[in-house]
Amino acid sequence: MVQPGWLVELERSLSEDESGESLAIALVVLASVAGAVVELPEDERRGAVRRALLLLTAGGDPSRGLDLDGRAVTALAADLDRLERLATLATGVAGLRAEATGLAHVSEALRGLAGEPEIAWRAFACSLLAEELGGD
């Protein structure tokens, strides 16, 4: 099986990271890709992200980075949490697991997301917030 280049690059990054710092970033990237088909009405998404940005700003320097357990990320995840969305994300994670066969580090990260749907959902919410902060 030929994996997409970004998965191979993510595997390389994870395998070379002795500190484990890239794992959180990998979880967010994987959740973002897996959640690409999660249906979020634009008005609902925009309002929830705006509220999360206010929480992030109120907490200090918004450029300090995002934390999966931080107030802004957890509030955004809670605002957008719906059973059907969680199920769609889980399906996306399962699809990525099939694509990542043979990539040990990526597969382990995906196994973690599949086994901890709350973390997967927060990682997806974090990706939405990161996208907004990136100005995309």
Image (cartoon, rainbow, N blue to C red):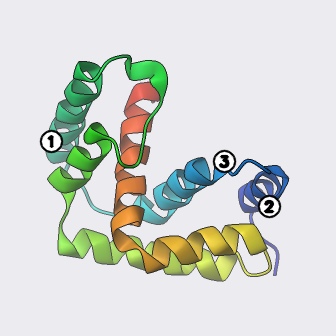
Disc 3 versus disc 1: nearer the observer: 3
Q: Is residue 114 left or right of residue 30?
A: left
Does residue 90 lie above or below 121 as drawn? Answer: below
Dot 3 or dot 1: first in sequence order is 3
User: Residue 124: percent from the left, percent from the top?
Assistant: 40, 55
Are the residues at dot 3 and dot 2 in contact (C-beta closer than 8 Å)?
Answer: no
User: Residue 26: percent from the left, percent from the top?
Assistant: 61, 54
| Amino acid at the residue labelled 3 | Ser
| Amino acid at the residue labelled 2 | Val
CA distance for labels 3 and 2: 14 Å
Dot 2 or dot 1: first in sequence order is 2
Kindly identify the residue that appears in the image at 48 percent across and 65 percent down.
34
User: Residue 31: percent from the left, percent from the top?
Assistant: 48, 60
Q: Which mark is residue 22?
A: 3
**Is disc 2 surrounded by few (<14), some (14 to 19) or many (20+) residues within 10 Å?**
some
CA distance for labels 2 and 1: 35 Å
User: Residue 20: percent from the left, percent from the top?
Assistant: 69, 51
Disc 2 versus disc 1: nearer the observer: 2
Dot 3 or dot 2: first in sequence order is 2
Q: Secondary structure at mark 2?
A: helix
Query: Which of the 4 image quarters holds residue 51?
Result: top left
**Is disc 3 surrounded by few (<14), some (14 to 19) or many (20+) residues within 10 Å?**
some
Q: Which mark is residue 43?
A: 1
- Please give the residue where the numbered disc 2 appears in the rendered image: 8
Quadrant where the N terminus sits is: bottom right
